[in-house]
Image (cartoon, grey):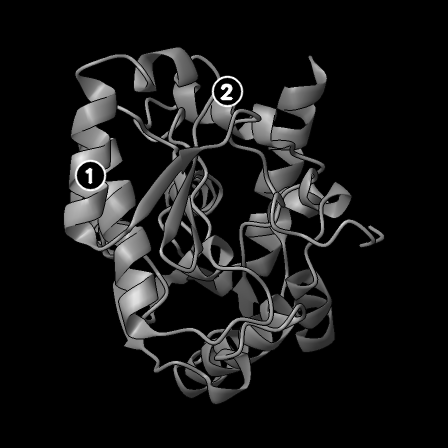
Amino acid sequence: MDSKNQKSLKLNSILKYLNSFVVAFSGGVDSTFLLHRAHTLKNSNIIAVTIRTPYIPSREIEEAIEFTSSFGIGHKIIDIGFPEMIKSNPIDRCYMCKKTLFTDLLSFASENNYRFVIDGTNADDINDFRPGMNALKELGIRSPLLEAGLTKKDIRELSREADLDIWDKPAMACLLTRIPYDTEISEQALRLAEKAENMLLELGYPGTRVRLHGDLARIECLPGYIEKIIRNPDKEHIISNLKKIGFRYVSLDLEGYRTGSSNPENIQL
């Protein structure tokens, strides 16, 4: 038995032990796989809860609703406003956001007789700058994928084996990551980023990020898309559409998409 399957069996054991829990369900690859596995194991008391905030892309919410509906999984959406403490986009925004959102999830779990709250953190996440993980530890949130040692590669492979069409879905972080740290966040800026990325997705550039620097859009795309994106008519069409959305300048980042590209260089993991 290979390592991936050993970790998969360990995940089953963890979920069976937890038995009664709320799955923090974003609609991304990790939380979707986790929810599907828990549902497949027929845990007696589980529910998916998706938190809707102004900085979560609306298509993520729609996909979360579609997935739970297609599998007949209980699903609750909780609407939360923009926490005042992160409106200036501080460097510890992820910590403060997670603390706020997961405190609400714990309250929901307690009020509805669920024993645990679990999330989709995986084994690769500990090697990235993720201050929100400290908040999860402080609150006692369980992360079964991490506990089982499952990496993103493992999760994608297991999702494909389970015929989940999200197995190759690009990562999707919250829209606050499109705006530099220590910048006042406006509703307009969030919608600019969302509209720009939706437009690029529709043109065939999944996983593309549009970072905002004032009225300049900095496009980060996945490997293989840079040549395509600068070729006519794509380039002119993209520029025209981004200017219609509200940008004055459009740039293409030649380094392409990479996680944490907006992080200060002196951050220690």
Across and down, in percent, residue 124 comes to 69, 37
Callout 2: few (<14), some (14-19), or many (20+) C-alpha neighbours within 10 Å? some
Marker disc for residue 199: 1
Residue 208 in which image quadrant: top left
Up-down relation of residue 28 to residue 200 (above or below): below
Residue 55 in which image quadrant: bottom left
- On the question of residue 90 being in view, the answer is yes
Q: Which residue is rendered at x = 41% and y = 57% of the image?
A: 175
| Residue nearest the viewer, comparing 103 with 11 | 103
Marker disc for residue 250: none
Up-down relation of residue 101 to residue 210 (above or below): below
Marks 1/2 in contact by CB < 8 Å: the verdict is no
The residue beneath circle 2 is: 157
* Label 1 – label 2 distance at C-alpha: 29 Å
Q: Which residue is rendered at x = 32% and y = 29% of the image?
A: 206
Residue 169 horizontal side relative to residue 241, left or right: right
Amino acid, disc 1: Met
Residue 185 horizontal side relative to residue 89, left or right: left
- On the question of residue 203 being in view, the answer is no
Amino acid, disc 2: Glu
Across and down, in percent, residue 26 comes to 39, 54
Callout 1: few (<14), some (14-19), or many (20+) C-alpha neighbours within 10 Å? some
Quadrant the N terminus occupies: top right
Q: How many marks do you count on the picture?
A: 2
Up-down relation of residue 99 to residue 19 (above or below): below
Q: Which residue is rendered at x = 30% and y = 72% of the image?
A: 187
Give the structural element (helix, strand or loop) at label 1. Answer: helix
